Amino acid sequence: MNSGQIESLEREIEATRHALDRILSALQLRLSPRQRAKVAWRVAREGSTESLTAAGRWIRQRPMTAAAIALGIGAGICAGLIWYRRRS
């Protein structure tokens, strides 16, 4: 191996080291507890927004069904309260 080949190999090794440093830095940022918490919060927030939007769309498309469900839930809560008070 001549000196030109050695210098070329050394430059390639140095470039690889820099690339690995950048990759490791990016991984450390992505895997940090703070960053993971931010991502989890964003996913939860986006998911809840999508769920509420879908629920609103469903209610607008089926107002009578939604009203019946709401009345059923209300009746169940009232029955539970009456049962609880009688039990006490």
Image (tube, rainbow, N blue to C red):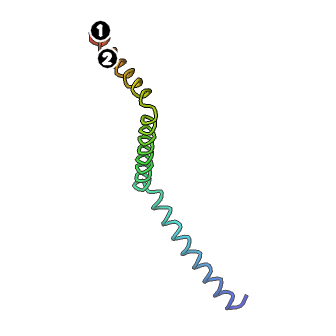
Image coords of residue 87 (percent x, y): 29, 8
Mark 2 vs mark 1, foreground winner is 2
| Mark 2, other Cα within 10 Å: few <14 / some 14–19 / many ≥20 | few
The disc placed on residue 78 is 2
Q: What residue is shown with label 1? A: 87
Q: Which residue lies furthest to the top in this view?
A: 86
Image coords of residue 67 (percent x, y): 39, 26
Q: How far apart, in angstroms, are the residues tagged by discs 2 and 1?
A: 14 Å
Res 29 → quadrant:
bottom left
Tag 1's secondary structure? Answer: helix
Instruction: Specify the amino acid type for callout 1.
Output: Arg
Q: Nearer the viewer, residue 39 or 11?
A: 39
Q: Nearer the viewer, residue 81 or 22?
A: 81
Q: Is residue 49 above or below residue 3?
A: above
Name the image quarter holding the C terminus.
top left
Q: Residue at point 28% right, 8% down?
A: 86
Q: Residue at point 42% right, 36% down?
A: 60
Q: In this view, does 34 lie to the left or right of 87?
A: right
